[in-house]
Amino acid sequence: MKSVMDGTASWIRGIALVCVVGLLAACGNSTGSTNNSGTNTASAPGITATTITIGSTQPLTGPAAPGYSEIAPASNAYFQYLNAHGGVFGRKLTYDYVDDGYNPTNTASQTRKLVLQDKVFAIFSALGTPTHLAVADYLNSEKVPDLFVSSGCNCWNDVSKYPNTFGWQPDYTIEGKVLGQYIKQSISGKKVGYFYQNDEFGLDGVKGLDDQLGASSIASRQNYVPTNTNVGPQIAALQASGAQVVVSFTIPAFTALALLTAAKLGYHPTWVVSNVGSDVPTLTGLLTAFSKGAAGAQLLGGMVSDTYLPLISDSSNPWITLFKGIHDQYISSLPWDGNVLYGMAQAYTLAQAFKAAGRNPTRSSFVKSLESAKLGSGPGLAPFGYSSSNHLGYLGVQVDTIGADGTQSTSGPVYTSSDSGPISQYSGSTSSPPANGIP
Amino acid sequence: MVAAQSRLNRLVSPTLSRHLLLALGAAVLLLLLSAQIGAYEDYQLTAVAIFAVATAGLTLLTGLNGQLSLGHGALMAVGAYTTSLLLEGHELPVIVVLLIAVLSSGLIGILFGYAAARLRGPYLAGATLTLAVALPQVATRYKGIFGGEEGLTVTPTSPPAWLGADFPPERWLAWIALAAAVVTIVLLANLLRSSTGRAFKAVRDNEAAAALAGIDVARTQVLAFVISASCAGLAGALFAYWSGVTAPAGFSLSLSLQLVTAIVIGGLGSLAGAVWGSIVLVFVPSFTSGMASTLNLPSSIANNLPLAIYGAILVIAMLMVPYGIQGALTRILRMGRTRFGRSPADGHKGVVDWDDPALDP
């Protein structure tokens, strides 16, 4: 009797041990969501068993619309591709983007509409520094994930003030430092002037430039506001100061205006333009439109800029092949340019983030997983900086130049930096896209 | 005893008690409405109330005093920036902030009113246009104080603790804005029924005759301007709380023009018309942008369609109801009265006068 009981007891113990181990193995999940098994649930506002809804405010009309109005349709094209290939854990991603006309007051009311009425899970790719500063407080007080703001302001990298806000494109100060270093090394000995947007975008870039070039050595500093398209006085002042190199932290419309105004004044400095305003197809279109056909891409020859994504003309790059294919399939009416590449690359990062967050994320678990998941850089040339103390996206850029015939080519290595740290060369390699283009 | 009674009668005149009763009824209805609808609808209701305050002042100035102002957006900006600057870094009770904003915009109203007192018609319109274009640029010029293009942010006002932790802040702001709107409209309605109100209309209709009757024309003009500027300032202060950001782009010329459009569509010279106009101002743009997104059009058309539809609606409205919404309603009511034997007075010059004695039996 006793031996049978002993045998049964040890069987039971053995089975219990196996069950516990199995339970622990099934429960283990680094992202913290408790249900990682096969069923989709409505785990957060904006997520149902079959859909995920995200929102965005974009300048579809207004002074920032040239070029930038293509970004959201491009992201949407990638999401449609994603949905056609199974979506995110079988859910379809719906992208609800609305026009704010680059007007911070409109951004405020449209964002509230997205959060309160449309009940989006997260805000994605909200565009503009002044526009998004108007709503960052609101989104964080409502604990809505504020993902991949389309702005390089370092204001988004403030984990204590904006714990739910994440940047994506390289910080303007980092960009300014790399451009400043390039000027120091490759166009040294010339007088430098600045032309920048008079808000956080321009001022952050200037901070980086001053860090490398020395604030006191700048021949002239001119700024503009997007609501005033007359840049004649500023360009004339730059010409009068004798600046032979002008660093331009401008949105595309104002890059074009500056180039045309300078050409009219017979002023031909070397233009060093932030990636924000240097997309070649966009500028070509704007130059032709603004000058009514009198000038075009020939004004872009010799321009210096920087990039953190592959060049749109690099047809040997597998990411370009992937994204151009999606462009040709879904948004062939839009030009194939840097804005479309930007939109799709951002959408790819969001898809990566959703995959890392698990099947049924909550808003807070999504944010935590983005901080800890160490996402691959996707099409980017530099790594992401996301961590629990850093909400910056791509950490660096590579300088590129535009030849007299309009072709772009990269120059030198990729450099990474931080707002206050040194510039270092990035020696990592870029990745290839997964076989079907879905992370 | 009789003298005291008649004094009391004069204090609680039929006008005041009638208006207070109407206001109380409206306030109760709005309170119930705001509690029934969701947070985003409360947010839109707040916008209607804010614009109602601004348009009520503007319809007094333009419809009842005959001075066309294209600069009320700038006066709203004055109220909004006053609020943002007061709340920078410290908390103040909402009522204090609103009163200071009313005073500051009233002050600008006095200054501008006296400067423009001799101007009439298109010249006054041009002067107010200058105000509309130039004032927001002050914010960009003095970036250190006014925050430049990005503007200043205003922390949303949180509801008091006794309403409960779950009370949506949007509803609390709706209550504040609706209270401000009701108070403003009651005060303006009382003003219009007083001798000052009649002086406004007299100056609008015939300046020379008004002057001969002993009305100080210049003082009347300035008073009307100051009152409407104070209303715009109050609206601007509430606007700062509502949008959370005070930036020059939000107070562009198009805001001033939208206010004028609102009072004309609603019914020039009528406070009820001011309310209709605010409703149109808030709801038609969101309706048109919703309509545009359901059609699948190339992006260059789709992006600009809402504005085109909005413009078309305004043009059609003005062609079909030239006296505005309140004018159309009054005409319908009048047709009803004629049918039952009461003939109205005529000749209102395209303006719907609130509670015109000529219409009473």
Image (cartoon, rainbow, N blue to C red):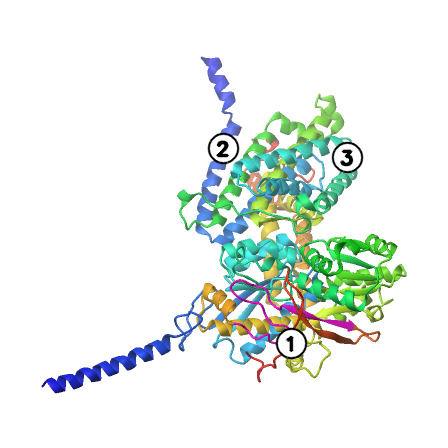
Q: Chain of mark 2?
A: B
State which tag comes first along the sequence, 3 or 2: 2
- Chain letter of disc 3? B
Write the start and end of the magenta stretch as one range: A374-401
Q: Position of residue A128 (x, y in %)?
A: 65, 59
Mark 3 secondary-structure assignment: loop
Please tell me how crowded label 1 is: few (under 14), some (14-19), or many (20+) other residues with Cα within 10 Å.
few
Residue type pointed to by label 2: Leu
Q: Position of residue B109 (x, y in %)?
A: 68, 34
Residue B332 seen in the current view: no
Residue depth check, mark 1 versus mark 3: number of the one nearer the observer:
1
* Real-space CA distance between mark 2 and mark 1, rounded to the nearest whole angstrom: 76 Å
Residue A376 colored in magenta in the image = yes
> Real-space Cα distance between discs 3 and 2?
35 Å
Residue A331 at x, y percent in the picture:
66, 75
Write down the quadrant of residue A207 in the picture: bottom right
